[in-house]
């Protein structure tokens, strides 16, 4: 897919560009807010990655302008200011995700993919399925191979998020933010324990494993 | 500092005093003008009108009866000794009859108004210069007629009034200037005290405070605000300094470990498997470094910033969710996490920070409680209507003498040196408690084989004070 990266730190920009390209994306670079906005209006991009602090025009303003002009391309804002109020400000401006620096490259790649897939799956969905795992969002039931699986409400939301992003790498931070709405780093392996409990319910008695651990990155639900 | 005159002239109060004096002067002149117009002006106009009438009457007599009739009339009127002066002269200017010995200069044209001076005996029979105002002109055929009113006495009255106004104006001017100088000297001294404080602070003495006289004037208000600002600044600078020290202290060891790992890998002959492992561990080390760094920044921000927007935060709900969140991990470690949470308890605060604080408390308990153990998370209404959150565990606990130090930033119990990021957790909770004007108290926990256990109580007041 095509990614526009608007970032003024050229070393970071080229590092991220290379990483995104290795991940299979075509990447254009813009070094300031004004040209970034221009590129984003003109080019057909699948995802925009915009730094918050940019020369000439603030990243949040760029997003506001783009949304005002009817550009609906998913936007990920990068920022050194990872605090709550800035995150909320970024999301209010119309960005779809917010990633505070410093972040790992894997985290960025995972989020860019999630944004891209998220766009295709926007809209009301009542059923999700991955392989023989089925989720009915209205009846709040989960079955695998026709066998009913009982989940706690949190487990249900965790699985729902994984199913909505099936095939993609989902990082621990993403789960923390999207499933629990927590914006801090737990220093213990809390997420891993939640995952292993979920795994015990959906994978344990079945031949094929659906919930995979991606070493150093996170998890992937895939048939 | 003593204020010289040039300095004094620059002060705002003095300028105000000066402006006030200007207004005063203007009013004085206006009053003077009004008095003049309403007294002297009116009298002058009356005199002129009277002279005009008499002049016209005499001119009519001349027109009807000729020079002799006029002469007769002038002699009679002069002899009557009224308020008016009459003079009749022939065409050459020689006096024929009337009150004066000498004819004043003749104005151009027929029957013009004139003002002149003449000498006449005053009340004490001494000749004095007097002023007269009237009408004078050459009549048809050449004779000159003058009718005037003696203005001498009128002038004296006007002069007295005018002098009185002038005098009071001068006295008032002097007084207002004096008051201005006095007031500006006072004000300048107070302002000087404030700017001296500012200069001392600029020179690096952040503990300096401006004097407050207790007279509750604007300068006291200003001094109080300035002092509050300085106190805040001092606190900020202090917390920045401490953050700097903490960063140096907390990051030095892991950074050197990080460096050593990379050097190790470089020093040994290349081995794909080992190198990968070294790199992976170095990356983990970097992540831990970043986490610590973030924690330090967050803590500094909580301590430094005062512009948090507080809203109603449902502490019970946060605790309930965190309990669910941590319960599996605790159980995995052989520790049961039990919540005793009164529902619906709320306090004004920052949702994110309170969540973070509670999670730090639970996480600490999970980290330090050995299996098999128990952690109790309680949320209940405190004595002061506030919300009281307590986390008690069956871990080793903290000796009473260490409990003060454990709350200090970056203090880490020696036994916990190995766990990354520890030490910051409770400091952040303490900072959050401070921010919400609440409190944090450490005590003995549930007790167990490992020791008395630790109980941490976070109190959030019902209303965040100022």
Image (tube, coloured by chain):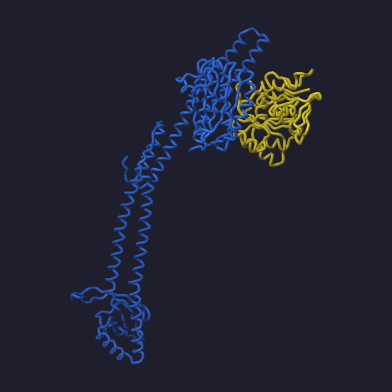
Q: Of B433 and B33, which appears nearest the observer? A: B433
At 59% from the left and 16% from the top, the residue drawn is: B372
State left or right for residue A63 relative to residue B443.
Answer: right
The reply to whether residue B374 is visible in this rendering is yes
**Residue B332 at what x, y percent from top left?**
64, 18
Q: Is residue B451 left or right of residue A77?
A: left
Question: Is A133 or B272 nearer to us in this picture?
Answer: A133
Find residue A190 and report its horizontal and vertical position in percent: 64, 22
Tally of numbered discs: 0
Q: Quadrant of the N terminus of chain B?
A: top left
Chain letter, blue = B
From what the image shows, is residue A68 above or below residue B96? above
Residue B133, relative to residue A10: is it above or below? below
Residue A166 is situated, as x and y percent measured from the top left of the image, at 75, 26
Q: Residue furthest top?
A: B269
Q: Which chain is yellow?
A: A
Q: Position of residue B68 (x, y in %)?
A: 30, 91
Q: Nearer the viewer, residue B205 or B373?
A: B373
């Amino acid at each position: 897919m095509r990614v526009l990266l608007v970032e003024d730190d050229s070393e970071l920009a080229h590092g991220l560009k290379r990483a995104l390209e290795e991940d299979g994306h075509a990447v254009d670079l813009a070094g300031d807010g004004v040209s970034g906005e221009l590129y984003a209006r003109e080019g057909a991009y699948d995802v925009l990655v915009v730094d918050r602090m940019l020369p000439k025009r603030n990243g949040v303003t760029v997003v506001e302008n783009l949304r005002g002009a009817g550009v609906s391309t998913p936007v990920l804002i990068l920022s050194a200011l990872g605090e709550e109020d800035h995150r909320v400000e970024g999301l209010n401006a119309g960005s779809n995700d917010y990633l505070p620096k410093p972040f790992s490259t894997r985290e960025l790649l995972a989020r860019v993919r999630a944004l891209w897939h998220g766009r295709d799956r926007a809209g009301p969905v009542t059923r999700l399925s991955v392989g023989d795992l089925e989720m009915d969002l209205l009846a709040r039931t989960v079955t695998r191979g026709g066998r009913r699986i009982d989940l706690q409400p949190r487990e249900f939301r965790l699985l729902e998020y994984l199913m909505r992003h099936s095939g993609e790498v989902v990082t621990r931070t993403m789960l923390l933010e999207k499933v629990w709405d927590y914006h801090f780093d737990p220093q213990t392996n809390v997420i891993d324990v939640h995952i292993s409990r979920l795994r015990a319910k959906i994978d344990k008695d079945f031949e094929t494993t659906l919930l995979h651990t991606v070493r150093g990155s996170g998890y992937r639900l895939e048939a | 500092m003593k204020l010289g005159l040039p300095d004094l002239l620059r002060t705002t109060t003095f300028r105000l005093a000066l402006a006030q004096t200007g207004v005063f002067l203007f009013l004085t002149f206006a009053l003077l003008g009004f008095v003049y117009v309403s007294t002297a002006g009116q009298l002058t106009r009356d005199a002129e009108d009277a002279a005009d009438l008499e002049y016209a009457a005499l001119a009519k007599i001349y027109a009807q009866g000729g020079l002799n009739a006029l002469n007769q009339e002038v002699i009679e009127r002069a002899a009557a000794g009224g308020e008016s002066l009459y003079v009749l002269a022939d065409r050459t200017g020689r006096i024929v009859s009337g009150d004066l010995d000498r004819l004043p200069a003749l104005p151009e044209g027929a029957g013009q108004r004139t003002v002149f001076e003449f000498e006449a005996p005053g009340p004490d029979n001494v000749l004095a210069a007097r002023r007269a105002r009237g009408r004078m002109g050459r009549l048809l055929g050449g004779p000159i007629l003058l009718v005037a009113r003696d203005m001498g006495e009128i002038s004296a009255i006007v002069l007295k009034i005018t002098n009185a106004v002038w005098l009071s104006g001068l006295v008032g001017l002097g007084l207002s200037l004096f008051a201005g100088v006095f007031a500006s000297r006072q004000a300048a001294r107070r302002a000087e005290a404030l700017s001296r404080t500012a200069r001392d602070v600029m020179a690096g003495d952040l503990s300096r405070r401006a004097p407050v006289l207790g007279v509750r004037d604007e300068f006291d208000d200003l001094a109080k605000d300035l002092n509050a600002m300085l106190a805040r600044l001092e606190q900020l600078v202090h917390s920045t300094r401490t953050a700097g020290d903490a960063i140096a202290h907390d990051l030095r060891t892991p950074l050197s470990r990080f460096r050593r790992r990379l050097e190790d890998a470089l020093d040994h002959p290349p081995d794909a498997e080992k190198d990968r492992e070294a790199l992976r561990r170095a990356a983990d080390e970097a992540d831990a470094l970043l986490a610590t760094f973030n924690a330090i920044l967050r803590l500094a921000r909580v301590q430094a910033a005062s512009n948090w927007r507080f809203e109603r935060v449902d502490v019970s709900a946060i605790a309930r969710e965190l309990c669910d969140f941590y319960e599996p991990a605790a159980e995995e470690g052989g520790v049961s996490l039990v919540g005793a949470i009164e529902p619906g308890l709320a306090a004004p605060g920052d949702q994110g920070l309170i969540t973070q604080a509670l999670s730090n408390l639970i996480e600490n308990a999970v980290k330090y409680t050995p299996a098999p153990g128990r952690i109790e998370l309680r949320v209940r209404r405190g004595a002061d209507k506030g919300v009281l959150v307590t986390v008690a565990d069956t871990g080793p606990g903290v000796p009473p003498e260490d409990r003060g130090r454990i709350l200090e930033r970056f203090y880490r119990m020696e036994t916990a040196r190995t766990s990354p990021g520890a030490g910051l957790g409770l400091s952040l909770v303490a900072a959050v408690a401070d921010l919400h004007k609440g409190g944090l108290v450490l005590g003995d926990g549930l007790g167990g084989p490992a020791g008395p256990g630790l109980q941490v109580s976070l109190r959030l007041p019902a209303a965040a004070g100022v």
